[in-house]
Image (tube, rainbow, N blue to C red):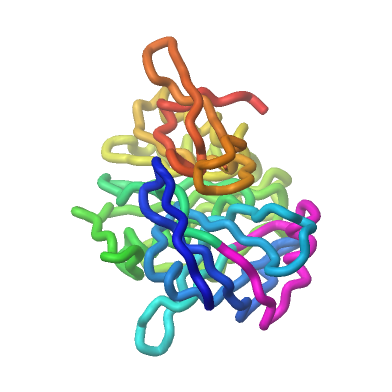
Amino acid sequence: MTSEEICLPGMSSCAGQYVATVSRVRHLARDTWAVRVECPQLAETIVPGQFFMIRPLTGSDPLLGRPFAFYDVCCNDAGRPVAVEFGFVRVGKMTTLMSHWREGEQVSLWGPLGNGFPVPACEHLICVAGGIGQTPFLGVAKEVLGLAEYGNPPRQPATRPSKVTLCYGVRSQPWLAGLDDFKLPGLELQIATDDGSFGHHGYVTSLLRNQLQQNRQGVHVYCCGPEPMMKATAEICAAEDVPCWLSLETPMACGFGACFSCVTRVRVAADEWDYRRTCVEGPVFRADQLVLSDH
Ligand code: FES
């Protein structure tokens, strides 16, 4: 593995650029896979909600890398982090190419990038995921439940929430990805499908509403998924006065703050907003800081 560092103003930490090897490909659900890449330097430092960019090592099409949040960090028999696993849905040229990757594939990747989710400091953490937006919440849940540590030095919650819930919604049962992975001691898993083929029939935001109706004291909400779903989640939390953080899935070209292709609108005063780069100032933002569109 080769590496060099990328350090630019605004980055929370320097990222490494690596050549790494795919060691496992798992089919998770319809058009959905998890890929494991051997990269100890990245596995040792990345924290939940951070991401990395990845592209094929050779060829120029696609030219640009794509951003992926890590799904899990994999350790060797001695407990040392040696690989990162990430999930994706086949939706375009790059992910179609990736769906054919096999063990031994050489890839270029750079990271860790972005800020990640804050270490939870609440009584009840509710994670709200839509589609492949469940990816960052395996690490969030494992960390907060004391089942795994991430970062170097490892992050430590000052206090652990007494309750952790994942509300996970997809369009239909065949797209439910990694349910076995989320069978974690202490994690309450609630499922919604748009067509009612599994779990609650309706949107995942209904599950959030139900949770907040039962109790909203001491609740924090983390959310990742399609923007309309995140906007609805932010509005529910604002109405209930519940702190909420969103992880944006903005298209990115460089991933480290140089190209400004990933900007989003952030409130800087009561009726003023400015652009912020999702790749360095995000991808995780307080929901009440963002100016979200309906689309
Ligand atoms: Fe280039 Fe964010 S992706 S600045």
Which residue is at 65% across, 55% downward? 65
Classify 270 as above or below 253.
above
Q: Nearer the viewer, residue 117 or 28?
A: 117
Which residue is at 60% across, 40% downward? 250
Q: Position of residue 2 (x, y in %)?
A: 52, 74
Q: Position of residue 168 (x, y in %)?
A: 55, 51
Which residue is at 34% across, 63% downward? 151
Residue extending farthest bottom: 77
72 relative position to 154: left or right: right
The magenta stretch spans which residues? Answer: 87-109
Q: Is residue 9 visible?
A: yes
- The quadrant of the image that shows the C terminus is top right
Instruction: Please identify the quarter of the rendering in which residue 112 is found.
Output: bottom left
Instruction: Please identify the quarter of the rendering in which residue 157 is found.
Output: bottom left
Q: Nearer the viewer, residue 87 or 279?
A: 279
Classify 30 as above or below 131.
below
Q: Nearer the viewer, residue 270 or 146?
A: 270
205 relative position to 198: left or right: left
Classify 48 as above or below 293.
below
260 relative position to 172: left or right: left
Question: Does 101 appear in magenta?
Answer: yes
